[in-house]
Amino acid sequence: MSGFDFDAPSADKKILEEGLAFTPKFDDHGLVTAVVTDARDGELLMVAHMNAEAIALTLDTGIGHYYSRSRAKIWKKGESSGNLQTVKEIRVDCDQDAIWLKVEVAGHDATCHTGRRSCFYRTAQLADGKPSLEIADDHRHFDPGDVYGH
Amino acid sequence: MSGFDFDAPSADKKILEEGLAFTPKFDDHGLVTAVVTDARDGELLMVAHMNAEAIALTLDTGIGHYYSRSRAKIWKKGESSGNLQTVKEIRVDCDQDAIWLKVEVAGHDATCHTGRRSCFYRTAQLADGKPSLEIADDHRHFDPGDVYGH
């Protein structure tokens, strides 16, 4: 664990929104939403969650760390695949319950576990009045079977 | 309410991730995360939540609708301020629990209730080992007091 804690968010909306104290507003599970974009061109790569430790590790090391809800532990993104994220800038939103990370992706330049650059590889629309998807990006930068094991 | 429901997400990961059925994976509160970027240049404008009705209304009308957790109701973004969002493209992520909307913002070209273009107007970093914020964008496109009332 890193050597600092976050102060609790101010109940004063003006301080929370206009102040310069970084006081993440964690939800009931101790998490905030993390939005990760490519620092090169702004492409949305993934949406994840961070707890206090993940934010602290990210600030300390400059490498993107998250909290995996499915595995219930800290997740150093890219540790298995080599697609580590160097964080170029961190931003926080008005009420401090969402964090934006602009990153450079190492390795295969791919963020999705399916091998694609971004997790957002499908568009959604109505087709004949029914919600449906279309593949927008089907290029696999790596073979998930090779990288994560079969 | 719109005239369609969403099918439940498949338990088969391959169908969920590679299929063309739009089956949002709602959380225990019936919500998915919505990431909203500017269709012009990819700037992250806001993070919000959508329930099934908000997604349906957005698909039906082409205007961004969300679910306001604080007000516990559907929220047509910009209804008070005039900063309505015309949705140019919708994407969904691999496990279908996050949605990306690329939008054009009308009115003041501002999305944050503080009057700024984006809710993410502050950067976060360590300063002397302490997490702190800096203002990255302080330009107000409108006066919140004028728009929302004092």
Image (tube, coloured by chain):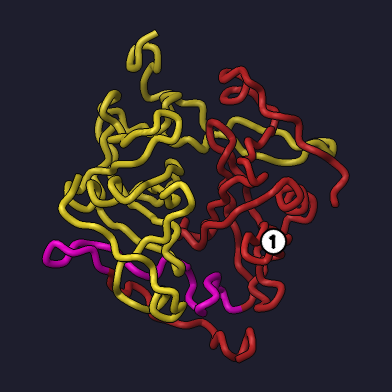
Chain colours: A yellow, B red
Q: Main secondary structure of the magenta part?
A: loop
Q: Is residue B129 magenta?
A: yes
Total numbered badges shown on the rendered structure: 1
Q: Quadrant of the C terminus of chain A?
A: top left
Q: Is residue B41 magenta?
A: no
Q: Position of residue B127 (x, y in %)?
A: 16, 66
Q: Identify the element where label 1 is drawn.
A: loop
Q: Can residue A34 be seen from the camera position used here?
A: no
Q: Give the camera-side residue of A70 and B38.
A: A70
Q: Position of residue B8 (x, y in %)?
A: 72, 29
Q: Is residue B107 above or below residue A43?
A: below
Q: Quadrant of the N terminus of chain A?
A: top left
Q: Is residue B7 above or below residue A99?
A: above
Dot 1 corresponds to which residue? B72
Task: Give me the chain letter of mark 1.
Answer: B
Q: Residue furthest right?
A: B3
Q: Magenta span covers which residues?
A: B108-132
Q: Residue furthest top?
A: A150
Q: Amino acid at mark 1?
A: Ala
Q: Residue A14: name its quadrant.
A: bottom left
Describe residue B118's horizontal placement relative to residue A63 as left or right. right
Tell me what residue is drawn at x 39 percent, y 73 percent.
A10
Q: Is residue B45 above or below residue A76?
A: below
Q: Position of residue B83 (x, y in %)?
A: 64, 73
Disc 1 packing (10 Å; few <14; some 14–19; many ≥20): few
Tell me what residue is drawn at x 58 percent, y 23 percent.
B18
